[in-house]
Amino acid sequence: MSFEELNKKLSPTIKRIAWRLNGHYRSFNHDDLYQEATIHLWNSFLSGKLDDKTDSYVLQGCYFHLKNYIRKVNERSNVVSINTASSMDENVTVENILGEYWACQDCRGQLHNKFLVQSILNNGFNPREKRLLEYYSQGLTTRDIGKRMGISHVSVVKMMQKIRIKAQKYLDR
């Protein structure tokens, strides 16, 4: 089987895996994760590691590769709060803090998205859903979140589905 055939067959499932993992991490979008999984698949194909493997095994390998990739990159990322920097000096503005990056359209778009997320959190979710999202943003697994909240992991999954629906309705307005 050629790589193109393998990729065509597995691509929809890899995209779903990337989409599911995307909600957990702010550093990536699902396209980035899909590309990383495809590169991993390509490297494994070239080295002959996929010759006698089932589709399920290959997809599981892509999933674990993405989880490991995200863990490694998140450990190296650095998050800085604008609020912390601006609270130290009242005369400091966002433009002063961001400097040349304020001129970047993408940066302003990302900042807009963060404010949008904050607005959705403040207007669309109950305290229990906010707590679940906080645990999710910390990178906890579904089972860990369930233990902390005193509910089953299935309930956590169902709550996340409801949260996605609420967020989508808010964004479609």
Image (tube, rainbow, N blue to C red):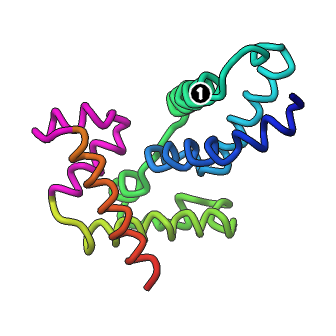
Query: Which is more toward the observer, 147 or 84?
Result: 147
Is 145 part of what is drawn in magenta? yes
Please tell me which residue is depicted at 32% across the width and 34% down the height of the picture: 140
Task: Please give the residue where the numbered disc 1 appears in the rendered image.
Answer: 56
Q: Which residues are magenta?
A: 128-152
In which image quadrant can residue 102 be found?
bottom right
Element type at mark 1: helix
| Apparent side of residue 154 relative to residue 55 in the rendered image (left or right) | left
Residue 164: which quarter of the image?
bottom left
Q: Residue at x 26, y 32 (%)?
A: 143
Relative to 139, 80 lies left or right: right
- Give residue 105's position: percent from left, percent from top: 68, 69
- Given residues 132 and 105, the one toward you in this image is 132
| Majority secondary structure of magenta residues | helix
Does residue 102 show up magenta in the picture? no
Q: Is 98 rendered above or below residue 95?
A: above
Residue 92 in the image: x percent, y percent? Answer: 45, 64
Residue at the spot 24% in from the left edge and 49% down from the top edge:
132
Horizontal placement of 98 versus 92: left or right? right
